[in-house]
Image (cartoon, rainbow, N blue to C red):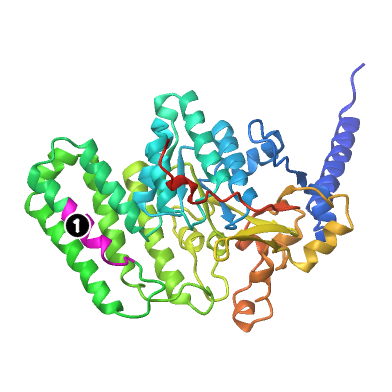
Amino acid sequence: MKMNSSKLITMSVVVGLILLVMVACEAKPLSEEEYIKKYAVELKIDETVDNLELESFNKIIKDKRIIFTNEMHGVNENSIIQTKVSQYLIDNWGLKYILVEGGYAAGTILNTYIQTGDEELLNQYKKIYLMNKFNNTSYYDYMKSLFEKNKELSEEHKIRIIGIDSIENVPCVKMFIDLLIKNNPDLSPEQINVLNTFSSEIEEVDILNSTLEYNVEENKSKVQQAVNKLESHITSNDVEYEENLEDSLFELKVILSNIKNTQEISGKSLNDHYNKKEFYEVRDKNTYNNFKILDEKFNLEKSYIHYGGSHVYQKEFNGVKYLASYLNDDDELRGKIYSFSTVYNQGGIFKYESCSNETFSNISGDLKRIIKESKLEGKNFILDLSKASSPFKKAMSKIPFSEYDSNYFEKEVFKNNAGVCTDYVQGIIFIDYPTPIQWISLDIFKDKK
């Protein structure tokens, strides 16, 4: 039996109206409470292999070039999040590059480890970062998971770690020089001597000089002289260096550029972001410039960056412009970045300053209240803020930010460039009960029996 055309038209109109109403209902902004309760996905923090709960982000990040998560030093879950996110991105997104908050020398050492599994190399790295965020068991478990993953991947799909930070670490630079000499046997005795001399000269100074307020200018001069001497020798013998070092020459030049650029901010305190705007903006601008140079060299098409809290904000925050903001202002990258803000409920943290565990949380009161009143209490979760019905696309809110940053909401400087939440971050990772890292102590210095 055939349906006449008038009935067919009527049915089509009715179906169209129903679909229109459904879309309108979906797009109608929900309250913050309603949105979080409806769209928060429980995060299985102990499961770092399958990561099936992250599948809801497949379409959201499909066309992105950079995924950001932010860090909290001294919290065990910090590295577990890195492990979970990186494993998921490798399996489902085509992740190729992990860009770490460390200088190029540090990144090269870590990359060498995940390509080779050289445990002695990793132990040397641990000694360098004894009193640093990297020195904990969960971070090295993360590195080992990347090495194991790389063993499964074909050569063209292997993961590479690159340090993009514009600040180098002296022991890491010295370790890089040692590896450079070891891995390039064609270097002439003169080249080896020049490289070793440079290594000795920078050992006597502080590249950053962030804590010592005396002899800053003298220190800067010594750093500049050491870099100039090495650069001059490379320029005068460019053919020999290119033949003997090949791609390693590019790496060396990046490191030297970082050391020179760091002198712009050497001697400036880095404790308070908003009162030390110059330090963070210069550092992050130079790091952005590094990204552009490295992108041209390696084609960083799919990259994962885990960086300090505010550095993932894609818009100027309280008058300070951070790395993600510089990247998002780039015409080639605008709209191609997805940033997660990680928020922690009350738990524990390891403080390197005192070498002890302390109580810690960075959750805003608004989010704490919503969680307490919902079925999410006691659970970790992940939440996309960019859906059509998201109130976070319509206004500013303290919820996606740490308590420290949200304390600045009432300041005039914040009101002047507020925007909406998704201008800054597009997702939240919530950890209900953070735990302190297990510090790798001085035991690593003991000689093997």
Residue, far front? 449
Q: Which residues are magenta?
A: 196-207
> Which quarter of the rendered picture does the C terminus lie within?
top left
Q: Give the residue drawn at x 47%, y 29%.
A: 150
Report if residue 64 is visible in the image.
yes
- Taking the image as shown, residue 199 lies to the left or right of residue 38, namely left
Q: Quadrant of residue 122?
A: top left
Please name the amino acid that badge 1 sits on: Phe
Q: Residue furthest bottom?
A: 412
Residue drawn 89% across the image and 58% down it: 373
- State whether residue 102 is above or below residue 248: below
Q: Position of residue 106 (x, y in %)?
A: 38, 50
Nearest the eye: 11 or 92:
92
* Residue 94 seen in the current view: no
Q: Is residue 445 one of those drawn in magenta?
A: no
How would you rate the neighbour count of disc 1 (Cα within 10 Å): few for under 14, some for 14-19, many for 20 or more? many
Q: Is residue 437 above or below residue 412?
A: above
Q: Is residue 109 left or right of residue 73?
A: left
Q: Which residue is mark 1?
A: 198
| Residue 356 spot, x, y in % from top left | 62, 60
Assign the magenta stretch its main secondary structure: helix
**Label 1 residue SS:** helix
Pick the front one: 331 or 188? 188
Q: Quadrant of residue 351?
A: bottom right
Residue 32 pos. (x, y %): 80, 60
